[in-house]
Image (cartoon, helix red, strand yellow):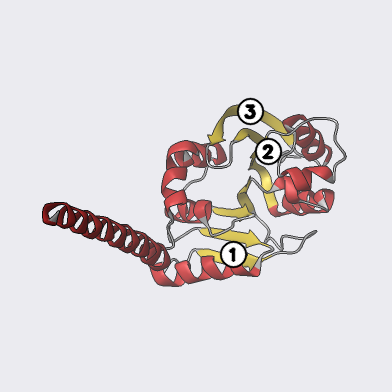
Amino acid sequence: MKVYQSFILILILAILCALQSTAFSQQRKRADAAETGITDRDRKRDEWQRPAEVLEALDVKPGHRVADIGCGSGYFSFHLAARVGKEGKVYAVDIDPEAIKKVQSRKERENLKQVEPILGESADPHLPNDLDAVLIVDTYHEFREFDQTMQAVLRALKPGGRLVLIDGEGPTGRPRTEYHRLHTIPAELVREEVSKNGFVYKESRPGFFDEEYGKQMYFLIFEKPHS
C-alpha cells in the first residue's frame, strides 16, 4: 500500500512539474514576443509565405521607397525594412490604431528609422508620392472604398512601379460586400477591379496555403503604366 501511495505521489509531482514547465515555456514565449515583436505565427509564416519571393516580385532594392498597406503588426514591413536599408523608406499603413502602435513600438525598439507607420483611412491610405512598390497582403477583401483606395495607390506609385497583391481565394458570384465577411475574394474579381483602376496585370505566381486559417492565397503582380 505504501509503495502504491509513493508511486501516486511521484506521479502527481511529475505532472505538476510538467505543467509548471509548460506554463513557464508559454510565459517565456509571450515575453519574447513582447520584447522582439516576433510571434510564433511570424516564424511559421516565414515557411509558408516565402517572404523572399514576395520581395523579389516587388523588385525591391536598397534605397527604395515602398508601402505595406494593411500592415498589421508589421510582418512584411520589417522584412521590407531589411531590404531597403537605412537609405530607403517603408510606409507601414493600417486603419487599426493598435496595429500602428505595435509597428511604432518595434520600430523604436530596433531603431529602424526607415519604417514610418501611417494610420490610414478606409478610402485613403495617406501615401506619399514617388513610391517604387506597394504590397497589399490579405487586406484587399476588406476594402470598402476599393476604387478610391486603388486610385490613391496608383497616384502614389512611380511609372513602372510594382503592386503585389496577395489574398485568399473566395467563391465567385457573391455580392461584393459579402467578401468582407468571408475574408476572401476571387482572384478574377481582383484582377478586374485593379485593372479598371489603371494598373496593368503582369502575372500570377504560385500562391500560399495558410494552414492555421485553412486559407489558400493567390499571388498577383501589377504595374503602373509608364504613360
Which sits earlier in the primary sequence, circle 2 or circle 1?
1
**Identity, as a three-letter code, of the amino acid under mark 2:** Glu
**Counting residues from the N terminus, which is met first, the one under dot 2 or under dot 3?**
3
Give the structural element (helix, strand or loop) at label 1.
helix
Give the residue number, with chain letter if any, for mark 2. 223
Nearest the viewer among 23 and 188 is 23
Separation (CA) of disc 3 from disc 1: 29 Å
Q: Earlier in the sequence, mark 3 or mark 1?
A: 1
Q: Is residue 90 left or right of residue 128?
A: left
Q: Name the residue under label 3.
A: 204
Total labels: the figure holds 3
Gap between marks 2 and 1, in whole Å? 28 Å
| Coordinates of residue 161 in the picture (x, y in percent) | 64, 44
Q: Residue type at mark 1: give it.
A: Ala
Question: Callout 1: few (<14), some (14-19), or many (20+) C-alpha neighbours within 10 Å?
Answer: many
Rendered position, 214 above or below 61 = above
Question: What amino acid is labelled 3 in the image?
Answer: Ser
In depth, the one of 102 and 156 nearer the eye is: 102
> Which dot, 3 or 1, sits closer to the camera?
1
Q: SS of the residue at dot 2? A: strand
- Write the residue at 69% across / 63% down: 95
Q: Position of residue 89 (x, y in %)?
A: 53, 60
